[in-house]
Each structure stands twice: as structure tokens, then as C-alpha cells.
Amino acid sequence: MAEALLRDRLTRRGVDAHVHSAGLIEGGRPASDHGVSILKEMGLDLSAHRSRTMDDSLLTGADLVLGMAREHVREAVVRTPTIWPRTFTIKEIVRRGDDVRARASGQPFDEWLAKVHAGRTHSELLGENPADDVADPYGAPRARYERTASELIGLVERFVDLAFPEGTP
């Protein structure tokens, strides 16, 4: 869901970005029926989605890696330590982005991202924390998917407003 929501929001903002989803489960699995139906109601087609397993080539080629939970960020950083400064949970990047404020007009994305990253420590990735983790609804009833979709919509909106404010390339 997050991939489709982020891609859609960036497209509507006019940001030319490649958005890919990868995780910890085996690749090739279709999106859940609940996820497909909820996004379909929003006008987004998730029916062709297939899971991909996180790998080094995806990670090293990414300008930004967003995880839904700390465990995703931990796994990514353990696999490819050099991506630590540009790997966050979506909740973390929004929270920290709010602290440093939206990217200024003309400010390079990587410069803004470095400010968001400043002061982080690896120990912040230990354990689970609702302040950083979006709960995975996989296998849960539709109502849980709806709550997760609603949470992701808000987070994606805020992230795009911070990282790509109107008029910022």
C-alpha cells in the first residue's frame, strides 16, 4: 500500500521519482485482497503488485529508503551499512522532518536529508516502538488494513509536503 500511495502522491506533486517496494518476506507474493480493494476504492490499482525481497542492489541505488518499521530499517542497514544516513521509517522521517522543517526552495534533497539524519544513533533502531513503527496488517481483518491505509495516507502526505514542498524541484 505504501508504495502505491507514495508513488501517487509524488506524481500528483509533479515529482519525478522511482518508487519501489521491497521487504523481508519472499518475493513474488501478490498484495493482499484487503489492500487491493482498499486502494481500488481510492482509484489506485495494486492488483499487479508482487512482493520483492530487499537486496543490496535496490538499497545501494536508492536516494532514500523508507521502512514501515524499525526492523526493516535495521535489516537494510545491516545489509548495506552505507545507506544508514538515508534510511528511515516513514514515521521517523516525518517526525524528524518536522523538527528541521520543510526543504527550502533550491535546497538539494540530499542536503535536507542530511539535516533530518543529524544526531541519529544506531541504538534508536533497537526494539519496536509505536513512535516509529507502522503496524503490518498482513493477515488481519479489513478494518486493520483501513486503519493502516489511513495512517499511511497521512504520513505520505506529510513526508511529501516536507521533502517536496510546492515549488521545490
Image (tube, grey):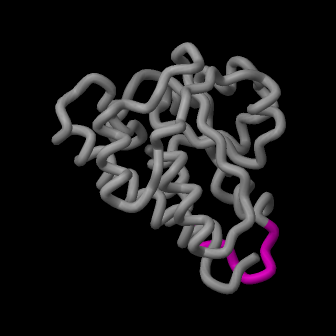
In the rendering, at what x and y percent does residue 145 appear? Answer: 27, 40
In the rendering, at what x and y percent does residue 77 appear? Answer: 68, 26
Vertical side of 108 occupied by 54: above or below: above
Seen at 82% across and 33% down, the residue is: 60
In the rendering, at what x and y percent does residue 37 appear? Answer: 31, 45
Q: Is 34 in front, or is 54?
A: 34
Q: Which residues are magenta?
A: 99-108
Q: Is 74 in front, or is 59?
A: 59
Outermost residue, top side:
26
Residue 118 part of the magenta-drawn span: no
Judge from the rendering whether residue 153 lies leftward or rightward of residue 28; answer left or right.
left
Seen at 81% across and 68% down, the residue is: 108
Seen at 81% across and 31% down, the residue is: 82
Question: Which quadrant is home to the N terminus?
Answer: top left
In the rendering, at what x and y percent does residue 2 appear? Answer: 48, 46
Name the chief secondary structure element in magenta.
loop
